[in-house]
Image (spheres, rainbow, N blue to C red):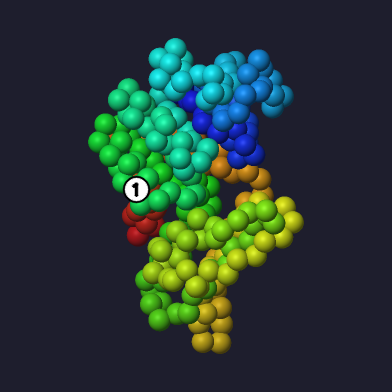
Amino acid sequence: MKIGLIGFGKAGKAVANVILQYNDFCLEWVLKNSQGMEKITAKEFLGVDGQDPGLIFSKENMPFSELVDNYPVDIIIDFSDAETISEYGADASERGIKIISAISHYSEDDIKFLKGLAKKTTVFWSPNITLGVNYLLFAASLLKNIAPGVDIEVIEEHFKAKSGVSGTAVKIAETLDLEVENINSLRAGGIVGKHEVVFGFPYQTVRLVHESISREAFGSGALFAAENIKDKPNGFYNFEDILRPYFFNQANFLS
């Protein structure tokens, strides 16, 4: 499966590092905002052995349509920013290239645009693409359903320079029908990302916690999504869509 990666910041580099280690996937190219590093490959920059081309291009020097015509891919994994989808989305969907977006903050118009693209190709979006967070969402939803009157608070912790409320925390709050005021944020040091859902019962509490140890967790989540949407028809998908069969199959097995 040929993959094009958009974005080569801290998360993008970690994702590229994971892709390069899997034989079932091939990192064809990386598209980044700024010039530089274009004379080396992603595997050379990261010090990873492998056969993947991993060519590095900048948006300034390589129009997207020219890039995908010369270096076709099956799937695009986007770890750039919210604005970039408008730059490549139409060209990708016209060519039937599947899109996996891991952008935390999209506006309602951006999401509407993604759903429009999904009429012509397969689009997957998750504001946090780590598997563990999405397992937490399932577990938290289940506990909320069997204890509807419980007090719930969300705590999110990230590195000191991260601005705004975590998009993942907002997603957790929305899933549990909570207000943004129920999200408690902490910024300190180099915390990669930690999310905790606290259920306050009378005389006791239950805590569900997910902590990212390394940004490579984004890469394994992105490849899990790629594996699970490769045969999906055109449409707009999220983690719930691809995880639900795993949960239901396990529940049927245990019953």
Can you give x and y, in whole percent of width and height, for residue 103 in the image?
Answer: 48, 44
The residue shown at (56%, 30%) is: 33
**Residue bearing mark 1:** 109
Residue 120 appearing in the image: yes
Left/right of residue 72 with respect to residue 47 in the rendered view: left
The residue shown at (69%, 24%) is: 45
- What is the residue that sits farthest to the right in this orientation? 189
Check disc 1: other Cα within 10 Å, few if <14, some if 14-19, many if 20+: few
Can you give x and y, in whole percent of width and height, for residue 76 in the image?
Answer: 44, 30
The residue shown at (53%, 52%) is: 132
Quarter of the figure with residue 125: top left
Can you give x and y, in whole percent of width and height, for residue 212 in the image?
Answer: 62, 51
Left/right of residue 12 with respect to residue 104 in the rendered view: right
Front residue of this view, candidates 45 and 211: 45
Residue 189 lies, with reference to residue 29, above or below; the image says below
- What is the residue that sits farthest to the top in this orientation? 70
The residue shown at (43%, 49%) is: 106
Quick one: quadrant of the C terminus?
bottom left
- What is the residue that sits farthest to the bottom in this orientation? 203
- The amino acid pointed to by label 1 is Asp
Residue 235 appearing in the image: no
Label 1 SS: helix
Quick one: quadrant of the N terminus?
top left
Quarter of the figure with residue 219: top right
Quarter of the figure with residue 85: top left
